[in-house]
Image: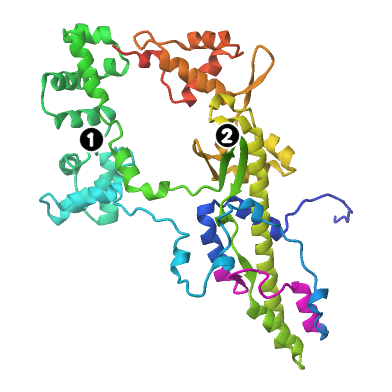
């Protein structure tokens, strides 16, 4: 049986403009130009330039005048939207192009906005190139390329040999065997960098040692990795010395030789080959002017955009026309939609600028001492909620601003996320940043006697003596976050 009921519920829906703003907030500065170009390609009513060059008229005014045939208002009666003045946010020398550009300037000025990117060979391209340096037939080259394609970014071949046999059968229609794959793998493992194509750490270290001059130290290091790898990883020095029947100095020299090896042979090649992906364009600059901090917003965050004058002219021409048929009305609705979309986008860019600046300003004020000194121990506890309360923004908005954004200071370039950390209470009841605690913990480990490294319990007691109320499990967590191994693995001869 069907029943009709009345119900009332409250829903929160985001407008298209709000959704557009949230997406723009997430875009880092180095991608903003591309995002604007995409919008201009989709919307011909949006173009670069000073929005005040042709005077300002609201879209509704244009549309109403066109529909009703009203006379155009005099300039002084036109409504002008309140605009955000961004000159305070920009560097003094970053004057918009339209204020300084001479007619004789070429397009080269625009090219200066795009930083040069390093074009280098990628890690896998380098390996593929080396295939041509050894004698192989087409079949072997196909197998070698399949092996290289299966090598991960660290330089290891972690895919099973049997799986590579199947891959070749399905993707290249090549029937092969595990024995043939291993033969080609042996050739690939002779490529540079040494250790490439290894299936585990032990094999990686042995391949690198094989290429070294076979001195007494290298031979001892090879024996340790080949036959006593478990004792080596656990740093059981006494057991190793007893089994190898060698002097402590010889054992130390062998360990030093092993520690010079690269446990991730693909790592350095990957970083070099893809260095262009690591270029960071900062969103903010903080400078110290005689003890006073000054915040500047990158000029790339303040592009000059306007509604196309041609589209405004089309609106005026429609207004001046006598006949208003269906096709003309459809055309003017299309024009109005594009102009509205352009104005929404321009407003969203301005709101993005304002939101970025106000959020970073509060972060700067919260971490004022750090930006003055560069001392991590001067950093205050700060979470997203703290900045949200000060700016009046939603926590999710602050999170979007902090994501993928960078600030340049005299002490270096930092991601905004770097300044957020939880708090820890001291004996005096003062709240300090966990980053400060991690800095002190790292310092204690740096100064420890490596022959008798401090255990987590000893580190906990040392921090407690300094006034930090901290549990051993918390020390262990911070140590792991700092990528510092346990005491046993920090032990040295």
- Disc sitting over residue 442 in the figure: none
- Asked where in the image residue 265 lies, by quadrant, the reply is top left
Left or right of 236: which side holds 437? right
Q: Quarter of the image containing the C terminus?
A: top left
Residue at mark 1 = 195
The magenta stretch spans residue 448:
no
Task: Return the x and y of residue 272 as percentages of the image width and height.
Answer: 32, 44
Q: Is residue 252 above or below residue 303?
A: above
Residue drawn 56% across the image and 8% down it? 465
Q: Is residue 414 visible?
A: yes
- Asked where in the image residue 75 lies, by quadrant, the reply is bottom right
Q: Secondary structure at mark 2?
A: helix
Task: Return the x and y of residue 246 as percentages of the image width and height.
Answer: 16, 9
Residue drawn 30% across the image and 19% down it? 233
Q: Which residues are magenta?
A: 40-67
Left or right of 249: which side holds 79? right
Q: In terms of sequence position, does the residue under pointer 1 or pointer 2 come before the other?
A: 1
Count of numbered circles in the view: 2
Left or right of 363: which side holds 195? left
Left or right of 224: which side holds 414? right
- Disc sitting over residue 371 in the figure: 2
Task: Return the x and y of residue 113 as percentages of the image width and height.
Answer: 48, 59
């Amino acid at each position: 049986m069907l029943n009709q009921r009345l119900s009332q519920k409250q829903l929160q829906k985001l407008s298209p403009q709000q959704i557009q703003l949230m997406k723009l907030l997430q875009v880092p500065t180095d991608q903003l130009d591309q995002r604007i170009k995409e919008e201009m390609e989709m919307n011909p009513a949006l173009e670069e330039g000073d929005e005040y060059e042709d005077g300002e008229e609201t879209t509704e005014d244009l549309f109403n005048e066109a529909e009703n045939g009203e006379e155009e208002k005099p300039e002084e009666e036109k409504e002008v939207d309140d605009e955000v003045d961004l000159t305070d946010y920009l560097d003094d020398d970053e004057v918009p192009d339209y204020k300084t550009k001479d007619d004789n300037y070429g397009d080269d000025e625009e090219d200066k906005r795009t930083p040069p990117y390093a074009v280098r060979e990628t890690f896998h391209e380098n390996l593929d190139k080396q295939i041509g340096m050894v004698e192989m037939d087409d079949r072997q080259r196909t197998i070698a390329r399949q092996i290289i394609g299966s090598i991960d970014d660290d330089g290891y071949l972690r895919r099973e040999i049997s799986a590579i046999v199947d891959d070749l059968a399905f993707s290249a229609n090549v029937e092969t065997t595990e024995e043939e794959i291993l033969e080609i793998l042996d050739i690939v493992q002779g490529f540079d960098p040494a250790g490439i194509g290894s299936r585990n750490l032990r094999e990686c270290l042995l391949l690198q040692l094989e290429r070294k001059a076979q001195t007494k130290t290298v031979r001892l290091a090879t024996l340790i990795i080949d036959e006593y790898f478990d004792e080596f990883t656990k740093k059981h020095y006494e057991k190793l010395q007893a089994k190898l029947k060698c002097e402590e100095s010889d054992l130390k020299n062998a360990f030093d030789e092993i520690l010079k090896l690269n446990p991730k042979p693909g790592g350095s090649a990957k970083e070099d080959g893809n260095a262009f992906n690591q270029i960071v364009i900062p969103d903010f600059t903080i400078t110290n002017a005689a003890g006073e901090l000054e915040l500047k917003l990158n000029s790339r965050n303040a592009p000059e955009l306007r509604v196309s004058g041609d589209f405004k002219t089309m609106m005026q021409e429609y207004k001046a026309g006598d006949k208003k048929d269906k096709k003309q009305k459809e055309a003017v609705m299309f024009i109005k939609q594009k102009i509205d979309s352009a104005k929404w986008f321009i407003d969203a860019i301005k709101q993005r600028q304002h939101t970025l600046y106000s959020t970073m300003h509060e972060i700067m004020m919260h971490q004022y001492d750090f930006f003055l000194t560069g001392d991590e121990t001067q950093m205050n506890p700060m979470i997203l909620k703290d900045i949200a309360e000060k700016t009046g923004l939603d926590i999710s908005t602050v999170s979007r601003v902090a994501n993928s954004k960078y600030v340049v200071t005299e002490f270096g370039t930092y991601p905004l996320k770097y300044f957020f950390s939880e708090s820890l209470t001291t004996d005096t009841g003062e709240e300090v940043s966990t980053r400060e605690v991690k800095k002190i913990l790292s310092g204690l480990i740096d100064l420890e006697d490596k022959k008798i490294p401090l255990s987590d319990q000893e580190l906990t007691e040392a921090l407690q003596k300094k006034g930090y109320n901290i549990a051993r499990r918390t020390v262990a967590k911070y140590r792991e976050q700092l990528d510092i191994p346990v005491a046993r693995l920090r032990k040295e001869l």
